[in-house]
């Protein structure tokens, strides 16, 4: 399979790239130093390059993220919304719009984002983050509707937060309750290929339960 991972530079991206790489898939890892995902023309060129070099794409795992919060609702800095809008929404829009045509032509394609429990249960201190995650989910569900009837699916994986080995090593006494390990997230992404596209298209899969 041909798998594109955006936001591949961090621990989560490394886990997802490693998962598919070990399976023998062709993995294209993209980070901010490779392509500016806020530049729609650059993302369109990325999609064209993937098509030229590989002829198709079978998976797009969009991992661009970020978090901003405040001490109280009234102290929310709307500048945080601007930052999160670009990170969590605008990059998603550019990537999904550019790769939707390729996904429509795949026999078994998947488009995946990682969302958060905060989208369904926002806190007073995290309004911009929760709102941005909710918007990203809505956009992905619109993509799912566009893919309906094809061999591809768009799905949302929901976590409380993510943890990796470096975080655990830095704080060995911490329990990280409810956190999802990045390796488990990667396996969950891979597991989407074990189910029919029609069954998972437009679904929110909660990894916290």
Image: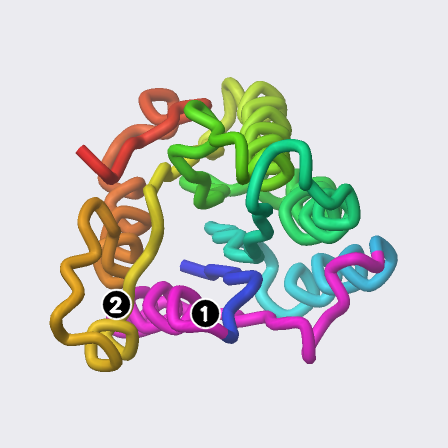
Q: Residue at x 56, y 61 (%)?
A: 6
Q: Check disc 2 and report its element: helix, strand or loop.
A: loop
Residue 171 to residue 49: above or below: below
**Quadrant assignment, res 167:** bottom left
On whether residue 23 falls in the magenta region, the answer is yes
Q: Nearer the viewer, residue 147 or 135?
A: 135
Residue 144 to residue 130: above or below: above
Q: Nearer the viewer, residue 152 or 96?
A: 96
**Quadrant assignment, res 143:** top right
Q: Quadrant of the N terminus?
A: bottom left
Marks 1 and 2 sit apart, C-alpha to C-alpha, by 10 Å
Q: Which residue is mark 2?
A: 23
**Quadrant assignment, res 142:** top right
* Residue 111 drawn at (x, y percent): 50, 42
Q: Check disc 1 and report its element: helix, strand or loop.
A: strand
- On screen, residue 198 versus residue 103, left or right, reads left
Q: What's the mark number on residue 68?
A: none
Labelled pair 1, 2 in contact (Cβ < 8 Å): no
- On screen, residue 148 versus residue 18, left or right, reads right
Per the rendered image, the range of residues in magenta is: 10-39
Q: Quadrant of the C terminus?
A: top left
Q: Which residue is mark 1?
A: 27
Q: Residue at x 42, y 25 (%)?
A: 121
* Residue 156 drawn at (x, y percent): 43, 35
Q: Residue at x 38, y 21 (%)?
A: 198
């Amino acid at each position: 399979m041909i798998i594109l991972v955006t936001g591949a530079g961090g621990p989560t991206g490394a886990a997802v790239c490693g998962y598919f790489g070990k399976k023998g898939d062709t993995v294209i890892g993209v980070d901010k130093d490779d392509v500016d995902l806020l530049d729609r023309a650059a993302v369109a060129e990325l999609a064209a390059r993937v098509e030229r070099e590989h002829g198709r794409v079978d998976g797009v795992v969009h991992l661009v993220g970020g978090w901003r919060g405040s001490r109280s609702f009234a102290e929310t800095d709307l500048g945080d919304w601007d930052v999160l809008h670009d990170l969590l929404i605008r990059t998603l829009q550019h990537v999904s719009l550019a790769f939707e045509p390729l996904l429509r032509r795949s026999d078994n394609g998947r488009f995946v984002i990682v969302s958060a429990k905060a989208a369904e249960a926002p806190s007073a201190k995290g309004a911009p983050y929760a709102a941005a995650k909710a918007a990203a989910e809505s956009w992905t569900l619109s993509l799912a509707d566009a893919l309906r009837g094809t061999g591809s699916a768009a799905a949302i994986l929901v976590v409380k937060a993510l943890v990796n080995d470096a975080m655990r090593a830095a704080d060995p006494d911490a329990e990280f309750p409810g956190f999802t390990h990045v390796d488990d997230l990667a396996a969950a992404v891979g597991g989407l290929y074990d189910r029919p596209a029609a069954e998972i298209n437009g679904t929110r899969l909660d990894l916290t339960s």
